[in-house]
Amino acid sequence: MAEVLTSADTFPPVISNAVRDAALNFFKSSCGLKYVENPPDSAETWCSAIMSTISFVGDPPWTFALVLPDDAAVMVAHTFAGFDIPFDSPDMGDVLGEVVNVLSGEIVARLDAKGIKLQMSLPTVIRGHNVCLHVPSSVSTTQLMFSGPKGTCWFKLVKARGHRLQEPGP
Amino acid sequence: MVTVRALVIDDSRVMRNMVMNALKQSRLATFEFTEAVDGADALTKFDPATVDICFVDWNMPNVTGVEFVKKARSGGTAFHIPMVMVTSEQTMAKIEEALSQAGADSYICKPFTPEDMRVKLEKLVNKVLTAKAPPEEKGGFFSGLFN
């Protein structure tokens, strides 16, 4: 019988650790960003930002949003694509979709190695000025922050309501 | 000079440019590119007579990359056209699905570098170049007899 690893009220650490490690690997090698321990909650900061999300179907279903303020988005886009992409350019949404797509591929591989099978969706990208990200208070979330010379970016991880992560069977 | 005609299939314009730039920088060959925005668009542009190699993303709307490879192969006239998956999917199950079940010839995980392209594709591209070379350059049994 499968063992319940976490309560429904907390975001599963096995998943947030996989996201953190995949992002560390990606950002350290390509953007010079560092992980911030115990970050302040930045989700309600008003700013010009771009948010790229992907959903994962599996046990549990969950979603992550990578939120990048404008300066950080321009830096990450330049490093990833190899050429300058202005914040308001149509290519900005395109490249940030690819960034989360590549990150998600590594996250899925890391969790697959732990026996957790997931399928990822296509990315969705939202850009705006003076935006803030609100998440319903009844779902479990966690946040990971990275900082670099051009500012900070963060991940908001949101687990679907009422699902419990179960340890895979033998 | 022999040109390799490549069909680059990805729903991201930026990623198509990254694939094309990496191939140019790999110096494997001189490439001529056709772009497709998803598997459905690729099926309309894929012609074994005019395409020498395909670079295929996996996760795309309408028709996925693996579906494109299967459909292109099912025509029966495209077995000799190398299909290279260029994708963020990197689990063993996905790699096996692409290579064993769909019939892709090579698998490159994103992100990639021109060096990754060179190492992974050298043999495939050389095979294409050899097949396209004029008969006297292929070095066959009778080559040189009439020089």
Image (cartoon, grey):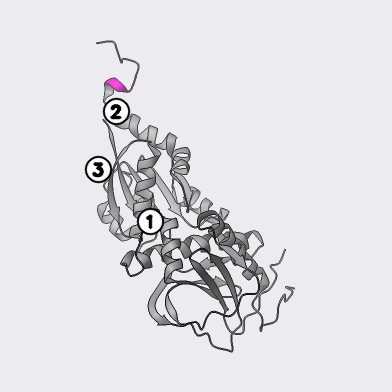
Which residue does the image show at 43% across and 35% down from the upper left?
B122
Residues marked 1 and 3 touching at CB (< 8 Å): no
Chain ID at mark 2: B
Q: Position of residue A16 (x, y in %)?
A: 62, 70
Disc 1: which chain?
B
Label 1 CA crowd tier, 10 Å (few <14, some 14–19, many 20+):
many
| Residue of label 2 | B133
Residue appearing at x 38%, y 79% in the figure:
A129
**Residue A68 place in picture, x, y as percent:** 47, 71
Residue at the (53%, 72%) spot, across then down: A154
- How far apart are the alpha carbons under marks 3 and 2? 15 Å
Q: What element carries label 2?
A: loop
Q: What is the magenta range?
A: B136-144
Q: In which quarter of the image is the N terminus of chain B?
A: top left
**Which mark, by number, is residue B15?**
1
The answer for how far apart the CA atoms under marks 1 and 3 are is: 23 Å
Earlier along the polypeptide chain: callout 3 or callout 2?
A: 3
Left or right: residue A28 versus residue A86 is: right
Alpha-carbon distance for marks 1 and 2?
A: 30 Å
Residue A44 in view = yes
Q: Dot 2: few (<14), some (14–19), or many (≥20) neighbours within 10 Å?
A: some
What type is the residue that disc 3 sits on? Thr
